[in-house]
Image (cartoon, grey):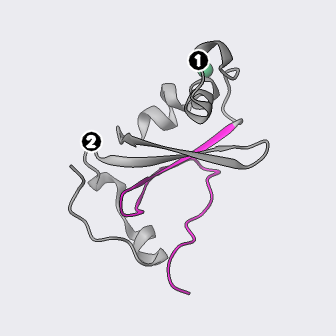
Amino acid sequence: MGADREPVTTAEEALAFDPDEVVAGEPCTVFIRRNEDGEVHTMSDEFYGDYIWADGNFSCDCNRSLFFDNIPWAGAHACGDTAFTVWIEDENGNRLYADDDAPKIERGES
Ligand SMILES: [Zn+2]
């Protein structure tokens, strides 16, 4: 179901990638960093666009904590927007979405 794009091989290509080309429902990997200790967990998902991650339900720490730990609602983190940082890549490493404080793209040839 993924879009038919060439894999990204340089940081320049990754930065030139246009997220508006993304097709809804495209397979992706969600990276979730717990900011207090820097630990990053990933989950496979489908991409539903920027909104839900930037301003919708998945922008909130309470939801992100569930993705991070895969724990029941009773253990959810308090609401907020500083405890977790998210960025999302497609199967080829193109960045589909990133919070403002996500790490910069570092892949590519030097
Ligand atoms: Zn919340």
Instruction: Tell me the CA gap for discs 2 and 1.
Output: 27 Å
Residue located farthest toward the top when viewing the structure as drawn? 74
In the image, the segment drawn in magenta is 84-110
Q: Amino acid at mark 1?
A: Pro
Residue at point 36% right, 55% down?
19
> Furthest-right residue in view?
36
Point 64% across, 48% down: residue? 40
Amino acid at circle 2: Ala
Q: Which residue is located at x 65 percent, y 51 percent?
A: 101
- Ligand 1 image position (quadrant): top right
Label 1: how many Cα within 10 Å (few below 14, some 14–19, many 20+) = few
Drawn side of residue 46 relative to residue 66, left or right: left
User: Secondary structure beneath disc 1?
Assistant: loop
How crowded pointer 2 is (Cα within 10 Å; few <14, some 14-19, many 20+) is rated as few
Whether ligand 1 has any atom under 8 Å from the Cβ at mark 1 is answered as no
* Marks 2 and 1, the one that precedes in the sequence: 2
Task: Please tell me which residue lies in front, 109 or 100.
Answer: 109
Residue 70 x %, y %: 57, 29
Which image quadrant: the C terminus? bottom right
> Does the stretch in magenta take in 74?
no
Residue 76 as seen in the image, left or right of residue 91: right
Question: Which residue in the rendered view is the most extreme toward the bottom?
Answer: 110
Residue 106 at what x, y percent from top left?
Answer: 57, 71
